[in-house]
Amino acid sequence: MTAALPRQLPLELGHEPGYGRDDLIVATSNRAAVDIIDRWPNWLSPVTVLAGPTGSGKTHLAAIWKAASDAEILNAGGIGPDALEKASAGPVLIDDIGAEPFDETGLFHLINTVRQSGTSLLMTSRRWPANWPVTLPDLASRLKAATVVEISEPDDALLTAVIYKLFADRQLLVEPHIVSYLVSRIERSLVAANRIVDRLDRVALEQKSRITRPLAASVLAAFEEGQGEGGE
């Protein structure tokens, strides 16, 4: 009986998602948010909030803005004198605020510092500011004056373009019907698109196979099973 050949294990090639401006794909779901990022520093309000679901591209847009503005990243859990000093000197960024309690008094003083110093504050959140757990009336009033831009979950056009780009970044040519198959079945999330393309790339390399629809179906099934068991 012939012994089974060992499987080829894919190398860790570091296919991290690109967060540069050239990596950004603009579609209906994110167009308003892209516009506000591109318009900086000519903002109507010094405080802007990008609000949208997980996987909608908020982190990518925040990274683009940080690179353009040279912003300092702050932690919403504790906003002290150090943070206020940074905000008085230049733009500041708070990522993923509003899901849990945060330093309300600190954020109130931070917004005041930004307004008085003529700098900028960008915050990203999975919720609109009106739904943040805010108990301080003065902070609630300041947040009402902020510019809030919604990012919707990715539509088919954006997911399709992103998946094509993710495959191209890996120098993989995939037939259109496979991309359509993936778009119709994966979670409406840019994070999910990146994970499934990465998984397909690894499995195809391991099996020395082209990316076919049966392979895509198999990987999707395994991916969903792993999600249900508390996987990625």
Image (tube, grey):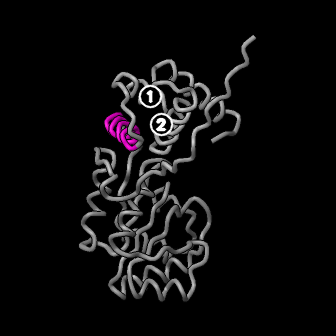
Q: Nearer the viewer, mark 1 or mark 2?
A: 2
Give the prevailing secondary structure in the magenta stretch: helix
Name the foreground residue: 107 vs 191.
191
Q: Quadrant of the N terminus?
A: top right
User: What amino acid is labelled 1 in the image?
Assistant: Leu
Q: Quadrant of the C terminus?
A: top right
The stretch in magenta equals: 156-169
Name the residue: 42% across, 24% down. 181
- Residue 197 is labelled as 2
Q: How many marks?
A: 2
Name the residue: 41% across, 75% down. 71
Question: Looking at the picture, does residue 216 appear above or below residue 80?
Answer: above
User: What amino acid is labelled 2 in the image?
Assistant: Val
Do the CB atoms of the residues marked 1 and 2 lie less than 8 Å apart?
Answer: no
- Residue 182 is labelled as 1
Q: Residue furthest front?
A: 2
Image location (x, y in percent) of residue 173? 36, 31
Mark earlier in primary sequence (1, 2): 1
Question: Looking at the picture, does residue 100 appear above or below residue 85?
Answer: above
Image location (x, y in percent) of residue 158? 34, 40
Q: Quadrant of residue 115?
A: bottom left
Within the magenta stretch, is there residue 166? yes
